[in-house]
Amino acid sequence: MNRFNNQRNARGKNRSPKGSWGTSRSSDDFVEEERHDEDDESEHSSDSSSERRIPNFRDGQLTSLTTQKGNPDRLSLFLDEKFLMGIRREVAYQHGLKKGLDVTADFLREVWRDEEGFRARDLAVKYLGMKPRTRKQMRDYLLGKEYDETVAERTIEWLAGYGYLDDGEYARQWVENRTRFRPRGKAMLRWELQQKGVTRDDIDEAISTEFEGDVEIEAAVQLLQKKVGRKTIEFSYQERQKLAQHLARRGFSGSVTAEAIRRFRQHANLDND
């Protein structure tokens, strides 16, 4: 049955829970707009995040959808003559909302989730504009902003679909940047990426890609050079222990540490010749 028929049955039965806010559409003939009093319209015309209250969903009839004052892309939805919530035109169009439509509480809840999805998507893009994020970081951020699990997961899948979230690429860049600017051993890199929610497979691939050959050993030597600087050391047992502890705290294994100290000592002796 066409969803835009003038059917009188309550909207919301046998509806898929997945939602559909990933596609943006607009139309001027899918709702009947009525002007309410200026006071009513201005009261519900804001699109600020402070209005993210959860509406009181209930069965009823849509008695009006009005264009919000100062924001023609948003509509105020009235259920049984009472204001229920503000929504984007895209959301109203996707759900076939119009005056006189009988709706269920579950159906309205899904409309609200789709509206929340647009808000979450806008917020997520701004969050990504600061620096790359993992799926876990994005999920924690959206849940911290009080979006529910469903909205958060839909937002993450939308971002991933456009390539804005890619844990594998995130891990590769993290390992590359660490190795270049703040060298860390494999163990430390694994721990850091695990804390960010990256899977073991993505971590393994990033490390194996970036740590070909002697890259980890050379990174450890770089750390030792930075620590010692221009100082002259005799490489006594105590001095070697301090250097080893310095590398161990940064996740380098015993074998890598031993080889790095050997190479560093060799270079230092050559420089002193």
Image: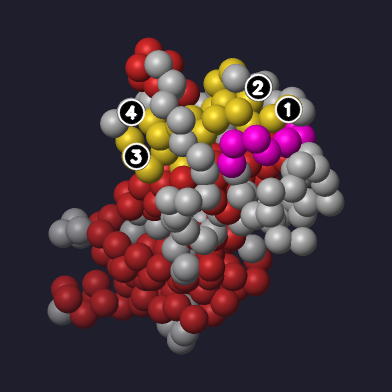
Residue marked by disc 2: 80
Does 51 sit above or below residue 260?
Answer: above
**Residue 187 horizontal/vertical position (percent):** 56, 61
Does 67 sit above or below residue 157?
Answer: above
What secondary structure is found at the residue carrying circle 2? loop
Does 107 sit above or below residue 26?
Answer: above
Amino acid type for the residue under numbered disc 1 = Gly
> Earlier along the polypeptide chain: callout 1 or callout 3?
1
**Which residue lies at the image location 62% right of the left edge and 49% below the top edge?**
95
Amino acid type for the residue under numbered disc 2 = Asp
Residue marked by disc 3: 72
Task: Judge depth for marks 3 and 2 and give the one in front.
Answer: 2
Q: Is residue 88 left or right of residue 95?
A: left
Are the residues flagged by discs 1 and 2 in contact, CB closer than 8 Å? yes
In depth, the one of 196 and 272 nearer the eye is: 196
**Which residue lies at the image location 60% right of the left edge and 43% below the top edge?**
97
- Which quadrant holds residue 112? top right
| First to last magenta residue range | 98-106
Residue marked by disc 4: 69
How crowded is the residue under tag 3: few (<14 C-alpha within 10 Å), some, or many (20+)? few
Residue marked by disc 1: 60
Quadrant of the rendering where the N terminus is positioned:
bottom right
Amino acid type for the residue under numbered disc 3 = Pro
Alpha carbon distance from label 1 to label 3: 25 Å
**Residue 264 horizontal/vertical position (percent):** 32, 72
> Earlier along the polypeptide chain: callout 4 or callout 1?
1
Task: Judge depth for marks 2 and 4 and give the one in front.
Answer: 2
In depth, the one of 7 and 128 nearer the eye is: 7
